[in-house]
Image (spheres, rainbow, N blue to C red):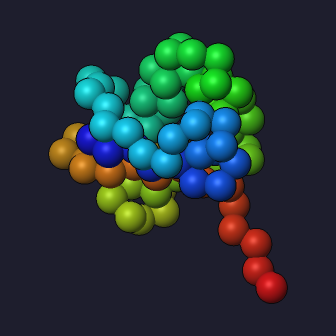
């Protein structure tokens, strides 16, 4: 699946997008896999309350299933104004 990173998440990881092969069942499982890769991933996913996730371009929760998902995107909460 494609994993997309936006704003400061992209800056911490150092890439806007990557292709990930995973057996993760949920978004949280994927986050836990990514955290173990390198320190930059651990830093990006250190505070999940500061992150939002979209699964196949729909706002989702971290417990969302990943079966047949093509894209997961991580980004900080949007601000208005």
**On-image quarter of the N terminus:** top left
Q: How many marks?
A: 0
The quadrant where residue 45 appears: top right
Q: Is residue 12 above or below residue 68?
A: above
Q: Is residue 81 in view from this perspective?
A: yes
Q: Is residue 66 in view from this perspective?
A: no
Residue drawn at 50 percent across, 16 percent down: 37
Residue drawn at 48 percent across, 63 percent down: 59
Q: Is residue 33 above or below residue 9?
A: above
Counting from the top left corner in percent of width and height, residue 30 is at 43, 30
Residue drawn at 41 percent across, 65 percent down: 58
Front-most of residues 31 and 38: 38
Counting from the top left corner in percent of width and height, residue 73 is at 46, 52
Using residue 37 as the reference point, say whether residue 20 is left or right of it: left
Counting from the top left corner in percent of width and height, residue 76 is at 68, 55
Q: Is residue 64 above or below residue 35?
A: below
Using residue 13 as the reference point, say whether residue 37 is left or right of it: left
Furthest-front residue in this view:
14
The quadrant where residue 20 appears: top left
Front-most of residues 42 and 52: 42
Counting from the top left corner in percent of width and height, residue 67 is at 23, 41
Furthest-left residue in this view:
68
């Amino acid at each position: 699946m494609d994993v997309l990173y936006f704003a400061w998440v992209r800056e911490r990881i150092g890439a806007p997008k990557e292709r990930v092969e995973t057996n993760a069942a949920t978004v949280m499982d994927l986050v836990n896999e990514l955290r173990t890769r390198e320190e930059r991933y651990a830093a990006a996913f250190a505070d999940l309350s500061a992150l939002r996730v979209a699964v196949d371009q729909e706002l989702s929760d971290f417990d969302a299933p990943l079966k047949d998902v093509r894209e997961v995107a991580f980004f900080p909460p949007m601000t208005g104004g």
